[in-house]
Image (cartoon, rainbow, N blue to C red):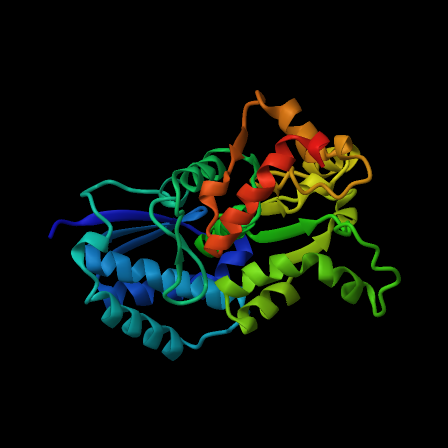
Amino acid sequence: MSSVELTIRVPQGAERVPMLGVAERNLKMIREALGVNITAREGSVQIAGDPHAVEAARRSIDRLDESARAEENLSRQEVLELITQISAETSVVPDDLLPQGLGNSTTVSGSLWNGPLDVYVRGRRVAPKSANQRHYLDEIANNDLVLCSGPAGTGKTYLAVAAAVHMLKAGAIRKVVLVRPAVEAGEKLGFLPGDLEAKVNPYLRPLLDALHDMMDYGTLQRFMLNDIIEIAPLAFMRGRTLNDAVIILDEAQNTTKGQMKMFLTRLGQRSKMIVTGDTTQIDLPDPRQSGLIDAARRLARVKGVGLTALESSDIVRHDLVQRIVDAYGQDDRNPSAN
């Protein structure tokens, strides 16, 4: 089989030491154990060699990155055992799942969206289940801001979280920020006991549910403790600038126009924003003030902004959910009939 080349994006400066080792010790061990040519440059690592060896090297670097993010200080022996284990696992991978193409170096940013989304739960891959969902992920890949509307169960929040976790694992970003407005769905809950976290947790629970599907409890807790993953109410976004991050605003139909403007202007360098919501379930006193509807109108022709509309045919929950949405659809299209 011919040789292949691969380029992997890695942290720069002092942040690369926990991942690559002091004096790039971990890369030297990968080179010696797998027989690949491996070179570290500013912000990237280039690997060349046999496809099985290149894939094993890529997976080894991914695992070293996970360990570094979890603040696990691996010894030289532990790194060697990790490489050996991954090499054995990769040796049985079918050729059609290996990197292909002699001399075709693929950067993380270019190859990031080829195939299913890779999350932290071993063996789990997240993939679109409809043409509209595929379009949604394409918009996320190609734009720094994506507005997605659609009925319940279409995967708009789940795919956004999966895309963010996928980018985090690939090293394309350093942080995931998940945001929701604290608006009650048609009922007043009154005073909620507990500290601030306990008060806002009911509003943010759906985002946590999605995260639990994509990483084990220990990893999620470490990431939240180290501020790699942040879950916050919308009010906490004022005054911030978020760089090297994916920022997801869920239930955006319940933001006001002013809140939406405040949120969108938090976008920093090398970051992406994904805004999701269902315009048929607006819980604001005046639905005409919905920030999601207003933003979709204002930004429809702005370069760098992607718009996606998911439909009832894209629903991936219980089959009955699609029939429920369709049954209510007529009223949603004709509010005067209510």
**How many numbered circles are shown?**
0
Task: Specify whether residue 164 is in view.
Answer: no
* Location of residue 249 (image quadrant): top right
Q: Position of residue 314 (x, y in %)?
A: 46, 43
Task: Give the residue at the far right of this rendering.
Answer: 191
Q: Position of residue 230 (x, y in %)?
A: 65, 57
Location of the C terminus by quadrant is top right
Question: Toward the viewer: 36 or 264?
Answer: 264
The answer to whether residue 162 is above or below residue 226 is above
Task: Give the residue at the far left of this rendering.
Answer: 1
Residue under the image location 55 percent in, 59 percent down:
210
Task: Give the residue at the far top of this rendering.
Answer: 301
Task: Specify whether residue 55 is in view.
Answer: yes
The answer to whether residue 65 is above or below residue 234 is below
Residue under the image location 83 percent in, 70 percent down:
194
The answer to whether residue 15 is above or below residue 259 is below
Task: Give the residue at the far front of this rendering.
Answer: 337
Q: Position of residue 195 (x, y in %)?
A: 83, 67
Give the side of residue 338 with respect to residue 126, left or right. Answer: right
Give the side of residue 55 with respect to residue 254, left or right. Answer: left
Residue under the image location 34 percent in, 61 percent down:
59
Q: Position of residue 319 (x, y in %)?
A: 46, 54
Question: Toward the viewer: 277 or 267?
Answer: 277
Question: Toward the viewer: 28 or 140?
Answer: 140
Give the side of residue 53 with respect to residue 336, left or right. Answer: left
Give the side of residue 289 with respect to residue 309, left or right. Answer: right
